[in-house]
Amino acid sequence: MDIRKILAAAGMIMTLSCGTALATPSTQIWIPSPDVKGFKDVHIDVDNYMRLSPKADAGPNYYNLGVSAGVLPFENVKLEVGADMIVSGFQNDNQADNHPFYFNAKLGTPEDGFGIKGLPAFAVGAFNLGTYDRPDKGLSTRQNIVYGLVGKTFPVIGRLSAGGYHGSSRALATPGNPSGTDNNNGILASWDRSMPEISDKLWLAVDYMSGNNYNGEISVGGSWAFSKQASLLVGVVFFNPFYNISAADNGALPGGKPALTTQLDISF
């Protein structure tokens, strides 16, 4: 099952803002999933990230309106492309709101593809492809994160996915991890499972993204399918829970305080 998320880059304000959101390919809760949309499958996503703290260093809320579609007419090799408009509600003079458009793409193969029983799903892609890069103004939305994932579904356990990513060190810079440091690489990992023991409409997931940047997180959540065309995911994103705050961070976690996310997925 693929749910957007999230994921999508509300650009990285290098030291001007605390937080981001991911430009959404098919996702788990926050990170990309191994799923790739089929030919002519079109999805509209309406995602919200609302901070669970009123503190000044909580980070901005984020609002994402995205569209994505499958564009290859093949069963075993699929390609999806997407675009998102992401804003923070114009909080705290967030300059990234002036450049709200982001793009993503993903190429992959499904589990048991090519008639090979037991073959995992594979996916490679890119997200947070922003449109603005002005280091002289302290802002870059071009995180340009490329990634690879492998996913496999096991009886009872559900699906396990793992992979890694690499992005722009400059756009992913934080006060405590400036450009040129190890701030633009990390791992991606997730568990997800449909819950037919409770209802065929219920799906649960946990995902993790490492890295000394605004996107590092652990998320937990679940989705309810109201129909074949509409589902709603509700979850919580905990940013950089294992991060060691340095003096340069001024006491604030990259990514900000935890956020409640709601993600409405409409399919055509």
Image (tube, rainbow, N blue to C red):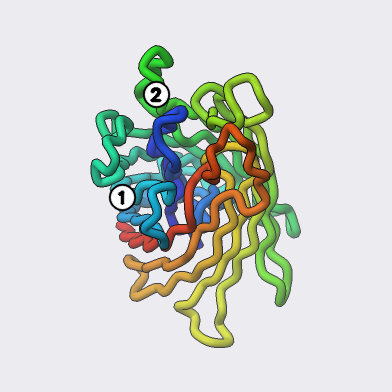
Residue 45 or residue 167, whichever sits in front: 167
Q: Residue at x 40, y 54 (%)?
A: 55
**Can residue 172 be seen by looking at this rendering?**
yes
Specify the quadrant of the image occupied by residue 219.
Answer: bottom right
Rounded to the nearest whole Å, what is the CA distance between mark 1 and mark 2? 19 Å
Amino acid type of the residue that numbered disc 1 sits on in the rendered structure: Tyr
Label whose residue precedes the other's in the sequence (1 or 2): 1
- Residue 128 spot, x, y in % from top left: 45, 34
Give the crowd class for mark 1: few <14, some 14-19, many >=20 residues within 10 Å. Answer: many
Q: Residue at x 44, y 26 (%)?
A: 142
Disc on res. 63:
1
Amino acid type of the residue that numbered disc 2 sits on in the rendered structure: Leu
Q: Residue at x 44, y 32 (%)?
A: 12
Residue 121 or residue 15, whichever sits in front: 15
Name the residue tied to disc 2. Answer: 139
Question: At numbered mark 1, what does the secondary structure look like: helix, strand or loop?
Answer: strand
